Amino acid sequence: MRSTLDADSRTGRTPDVPLDAVGYAGVLRELLPIALWREDAEGRIVEWSLAAQDLLGHRSADVLGRPASELLVPEGNRELADQLTRRVHAGETVVGTLSVRHSGGHPVTMEMWIVPAADAQGRAGALLIAVETSQVLRMRDSLAALESLFTQSPIGLATLGTDLRFLRVNEALARMNGVSAREHLGRRLTDVVPGVNAVALEGMMREVMESGRAVVDVRRTGRTPADPDRDRTWSCSYAPLVDGSGRTLGVIASLIDVTHAQRAAAAAERA
């Protein structure tokens, strides 16, 4: 384990993030694989997850019952590993950036949470929760870019779940609809802006989820609380929201107000 641990670690409390990660592992595993394994009071591996196998190369049949330090701790870090084990067995939680040995012999740098966990006999053991550092940094950068796009885009953007209830709405769309972003959440389009042919649009979004194919530049005309006395026209595009395994999680919607362009085109056609 890396000597940088002391600078990076915090002890004495159970961290919020890793426990949440354990609870939501079924959702997060496609986005950020979370390796879990458990060691008994003697330091032997007694549980080994599939994500641990994927990230570190060791099959469960090859690790169960064997000392974790022998398999996973790089040479030169055994003393530090022993110190951490004693601290966790004493009831501390350790959080840090550590190196773990891959089955191929090379080190894998991981963000780790090591928490006390009693074994089957009630003796002090440890639960280890780890994610690859490079994946964490990549996800952080990707989320930062997506957050910037969502908050700064002049295009109306929203995500909706499979029940077509709003999960997130940016300020541009909130202004178009004349309804705050917060008031969208948990509600359907038919609840928020029924005067924009919302029933037909919801039918289209269901087709997008079922077919897995996006639709682009569908025009809708109607009235919203933002401009209740005049018809406006929007160019709407919908795409399926899927996870890494291809499972549909909902719909991504983007909208552009094309009212002025539509009116200009109609005027030119009349002329």
Image (cartoon, rainbow, N blue to C red):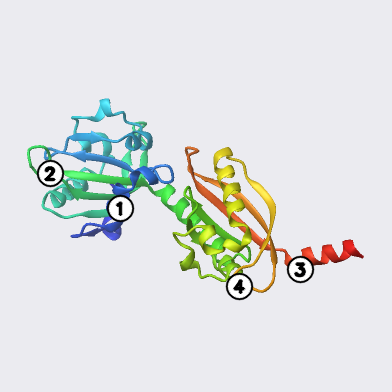
Q: Mark 4 points at which residue?
A: 226
The reply to whether the C-beta atoms of the residues labelled 2 and 1 are less than 8 Å apart is no
- Circle 3 residues within 10 Å: few <14, some 14–19, many ≥20: few
| x 48%, y 55%: residue | 165
Residue extending farthest to the top is 61
Q: What element carries label 4?
A: loop
Residue 128 sits above or below residue 263 on the image = above
The label nearer to you, 1 versus 4, is: 4
Question: Quick check: can you spot residue 145?
Answer: no
Whichever of labels 2 and 4 marks the residue nearer the N terminus, that label is 2
The reply to whether the C-beta atoms of the residues labelled 3 and 1 are less than 8 Å apart is no
The label nearer to you, 3 versus 1, is: 3
The label nearer to you, 2 versus 1, is: 1
Q: Name the residue under label 2.
A: 118
In percent of width and height, residue 25 lies at: 34, 45
In percent of width and height, residue 155 lies at: 63, 63
Q: Name the residue under label 1.
A: 20
Type of residue at label 4? Ala
Whichever of labels 1 and 4 marks the residue nearer the N terminus, that label is 1
Q: Is mark 1 on a helix, strand or loop?
A: helix
Is residue 7 found left or right of 246 in the rendered image?
Answer: left
Whichever of labels 3 and 4 marks the residue nearer the N terminus, that label is 4
Q: Residue 260 carries which label?
A: 3
The label nearer to you, 3 versus 2, is: 3
Q: Is mark 2 on a helix, strand or loop?
A: loop
Whichever of labels 3 and 2 marks the residue nearer the N terminus, that label is 2
Residue 27 sits above or below residue 235 on the image = above
Q: Is mark 3 on a helix, strand or loop?
A: helix
